[in-house]
Amino acid sequence: MLRAGGRSVGHGLLRRSVQASAVAIGAAIVLMPSPVDSHAVAPRPVPPPSVPRQVDPLAAHVLEVEAASELASAVRRESESVGLDPVLVLAVIGVESGWEPSAVSVRGARGLMQLRPLALQTEEREAGLPPGDVHDPVHNVRMGVRYLARMVALFEDVDLALVAYNSGPTRTLSSLVAVEDIPESMWSYARKVRREERRIRTQLLRTGVIVANAAG
């Protein structure tokens, strides 16, 4: 279970999502045509119960409801726009920063997806956006997803793209050219992300939530 601000989140959000779905089904049943004779006196219509706002299932792995809704929406929207699996993006965030927006690495990578200044500036420029706050969760995710997608397009393989995301594309390409392989030490990051991806997906499936793989 991921935590934010010292408080456990996830199960509560998922319960709310399930409850909202149940209420919606109940409302549909109330509005179904009655099977009695059409000449019979129609009973007074029963107003359907109000349906709470659905919580994006991805939000269960983010922050509190208010912030989670916007961030989960950004993860889903940006991932699907570039053909990435949103659960993979969640896994990268978990491994990179542990969901800490203010995280800073010893190499100067910052924010949820641990972007370095050059990567951030490149993606902002390609997107036609002005410089933004690297520690703003939504902005960081938008640029981080685009950078990961750029690595996938460059290496044409998700695992190699993960290696490049972590080690840098220049180092990754150099290894491939020099020895036509990636050192075990560089593969470990990709394996770690893949483990986290499986963990998140298993947790979603156990709670009855299925997140489609945008990559097919």
Image: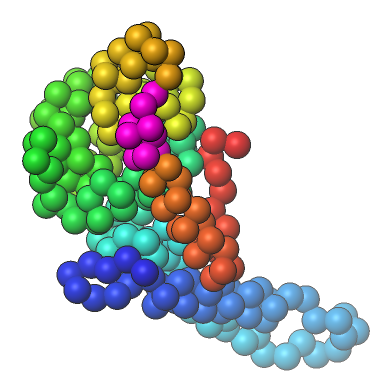
Q: Quadrant of the C terminus?
A: top right
Up/down of 108 relative to 67, above or below: above
Is 47 on the left-hand or right-hand side of 173? right
Colour approach in the figure: rainbow
For the question of whether residue 52 can be seen, the reply is no
Residue at image location 30% in from the left, 49% down from the top: 95
Residue closest to the eye, 182 or 130: 182
Residue at image location 45% in from the left, 45% down from the top: 194
Magenta region, residue range: 182-190
Q: Is residue 193 magenta?
A: no
Total count of labels: 0
Residue at image location 53% in from the left, 61% down from the top: 202
Q: Is residue 188 magenta?
A: yes
Residue closest to the eye, 187 or 206: 187
Q: Position of residue 148 (x, y in %)?
A: 35, 31
Looking at the image, which residue sits at the far top?
Answer: 177
Is 142 on the left-hand or right-hand side of 188? left
Residue closest to the eye, 62 or 73: 62
Q: Position of residue 106 (x, y in %)?
A: 9, 41
Q: Position of residue 174 (x, y in %)?
A: 30, 13
Q: Quadrant of the N terminus?
A: bottom left
Up/down of 208 relative to 40, above or below: above
Q: Where, by quadrant of the figure, is residue 8 drawn?
A: bottom left
Up/down of 200 relative to 149, above or below: below
For the question of whether residue 195 can be seen, the reply is yes
Up/down of 212 relative to 120, above or below: below
Q: Position of residue 14 (x, y in %)?
A: 45, 72
Residue at image location 17% in from the left, 52% down from the top: 101
